Image (cartoon, rainbow, N blue to C red):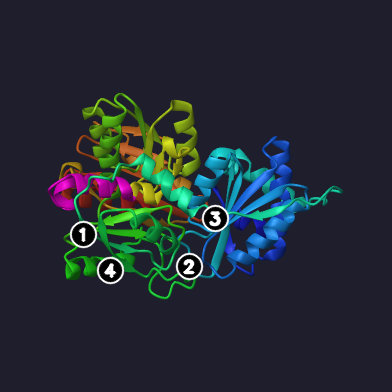
């Protein structure tokens, strides 16, 4: 059963559908999850959502059977975005399971798990225990079988989102939404029906084979169609969602992709107006602009490791009102500290609709530096390569820290180098005051890593 080591990731379960993750595995995992929840003294009902991948309903059905075999009940909410599953977990106060492989290609599927009120489950908060239960095999309890019920929560989800962002007085906007054949094709129509917006849909047909492009807007090549449509349609804003719609990326009126740190800064500014003096969390590959904006608006910035379980825990510990990751995940205290691409999109729409300017002009104050984007390098020994880079930057007016990998800070530049959790890869992010300086630092570090 060593194959399980490859599909139990740091924050979720993900692997090849029908090969690594099939109905038998889903049943065993449902049984193991129920057993884990009983140990944690969690409520006796689990809420289950699923995305549009062909295998998702089969896996969700098998998982539910595993859960109910342990005497626990299930509420199936059917087709859902991951943030809709988090909403259901939060509103109902129940643990949850979402069947999705997020932005991964069509041949994959997976399971995202959470405790009641959308509290995260990762390697350090229960996923290892669940994996061990799957490996060992769990006996089916000799007790009454639990009950499975159905509940449609789409309207309740939209109702809640619209209590968190005021979009009642925005000017008319033309917005293009690229759902990538993912779950935004299910949730976006319900949300945008209530907004003062003309919506031009792209790839809203739910299709887990992703016939148009992968639903992974972090890969800018997948934004090509949306960028062109922005120019052709003379639209005000473009939105691109990933497969399970928990992440949202923006394209401005020029057809230019928006830096996620600029959106983090915009939302942080808006939230600090509502909640003066509050804490905001951002991960360490975010732009320096984020901390600067937090300082300028009287907030308290808290720097986090990369990864949603870290940010969610820090939000709970600190009482932070908002958290942003440069990967396009945005977390909200009023949304049970969970991430929501739809809620981030609503903040952008509200800010634009309240203004009399363009999206690019609105975000201009938050684009202060030049960032490289994440650059991956395969290396034989990630530890040795990192040590070589650290040694090369250990003198002069430079500071180092090891919060997550290696971060090197110069006066007008910085970079972070951190290893992948699953493969022999180093991930490099560089930021500097100018394009030339960013390229100089980037190339110097890459030559050390790859040389």
424 or 201: which is nearer to us? Answer: 201
Q: Going 72% across and 52% down the picture, which residue do you hit? A: 67
Density class for disc 3 (Cα within 10 Å; few <14, some 14-19, many ≥20) is some
Disc 2 + disc 4, Cβ < 8 Å: no
SS at circle 2: loop
- Give the vertical position of 228 relative to 82 (above or below): below
Residue 100 place in picture, x, y as percent: 53, 59
For disc 1, the neighbor class at 10 Å (few under 14, some 14 to 19, many from 20) is: some
Point 22% across, 69% down: residue: 228
What residue sits right under mark 3 in the picture? 152
- Check if residue 349 falls in the magenta segment: yes
How far apart are labels 4 and 1 at the CA level?
Answer: 10 Å
Decide which of tag 2 and tag 4 comes sooner along the chain: 2
Pointer 3 or 2: first along the chain: 2
The magenta stretch spans residue 426: no
Residue bounds of the magenta highlight: 345-362
Q: What SS does tag 1 mark?
A: loop
Q: Which residue is mark 4?
A: 224
Residue 41 at x, y percent in the picture: 70, 35
The majority secondary structure of the magenta stretch comes to helix
Mark 4 vs 1, N-terminal side: 4
- Location of residue 306 with respect to 107 vertically, above or below: above
Can residue 429 be seen by looking at this rendering? no
**Is residue 66 visible in this depiction of the protein?**
yes
- Secondary structure at badge 3 equals loop
Quadrant showing the N terminus: bottom right
């Amino acid at each position: 059963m060593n194959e399980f080591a490859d599909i139990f990731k740091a924050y979720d379960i993900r692997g090849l559908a029908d090969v690594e993750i099939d109905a038998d595995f889903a049943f065993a995992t449902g049984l193991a999850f129920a057993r884990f929840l009983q140990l944690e003294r969690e409520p006796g009902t689990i809420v289950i959502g699923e995305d549009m991948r062909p295998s998702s309903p089969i896996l969700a059905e098998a998982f539910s059977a595993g859960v109910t075999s342990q005497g626990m009940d299930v509420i199936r909410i059917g087709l859902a975005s991951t943030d809709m599953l988090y909403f259901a977990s939060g509103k109902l106060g129940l643990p949850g399971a979402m069947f999705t492989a997020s932005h991964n290609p069509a041949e994959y599927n997976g399971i995202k798990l959470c405790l009641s009120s959308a509290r995260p489950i990762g390697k350090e908060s229960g996923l290892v225990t669940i994996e061990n239960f799957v490996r060992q095999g769990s006996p089916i309890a000799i007790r009454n079988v639990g009950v499975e019920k159905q509940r449609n929560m789409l309207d309740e989800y939209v109702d809640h989102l619209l209590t968190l962002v005021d979009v009642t007085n925005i000017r008319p906007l033309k917005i293009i939404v690229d759902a990538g054949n993912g779950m935004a094709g299910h949730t976006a129509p319900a949300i945008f029906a209530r907004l003062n917006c003309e919506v031009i849909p792209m790839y809203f047909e739910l299709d887990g084979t992703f016939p148009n492009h992968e639903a992974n807007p972090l890969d800018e090549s997948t934004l090509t169609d949306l960028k062109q449509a922005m120019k052709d349609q003379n639209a005000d804003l473009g939105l691109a969602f990933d497969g399970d719609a928990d992440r949202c990326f923006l394209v401005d009126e020029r057809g230019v992709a928006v830096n996620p740190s600029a959106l983090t800064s915009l939302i942080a500014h808006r939230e600090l107006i509502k909640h003066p003096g509050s804490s905001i969390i951002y991960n360490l590959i975010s732009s320096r602009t984020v901390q600067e904006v937090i300082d300028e608006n009287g907030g308290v910035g808290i720097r986090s490791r990369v990864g949603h379980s870290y940010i969610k825990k820090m939000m709970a510990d600190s009482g932070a009102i908002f958290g942003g990751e440069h990967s396009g995940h945005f977390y909200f205290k009023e949304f049970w500290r969970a991430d929501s691409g739809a809620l981030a999109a609503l903040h952008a729409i509200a800010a634009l609709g309240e203004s009399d300017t363009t999206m690019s002009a609105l975000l201009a104050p938050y684009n202060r530096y030049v960032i490289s984007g994440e650059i991956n390098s395969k290396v034989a020994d990630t530890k040795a390569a990192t040590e070589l880079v650290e040694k090369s930057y250990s003198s002069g007016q430079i500071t180092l820290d090891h919060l997550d990998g290696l971060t090197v800070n110069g006066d007008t530049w910085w970079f972070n180098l951190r290893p992948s959790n699953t493969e022999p890869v180093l991930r490099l992010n560089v930021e500097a005051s100018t394009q030339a300086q960013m390229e100089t630092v980037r190339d110097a570090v890459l030559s050390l890593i790859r040389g």
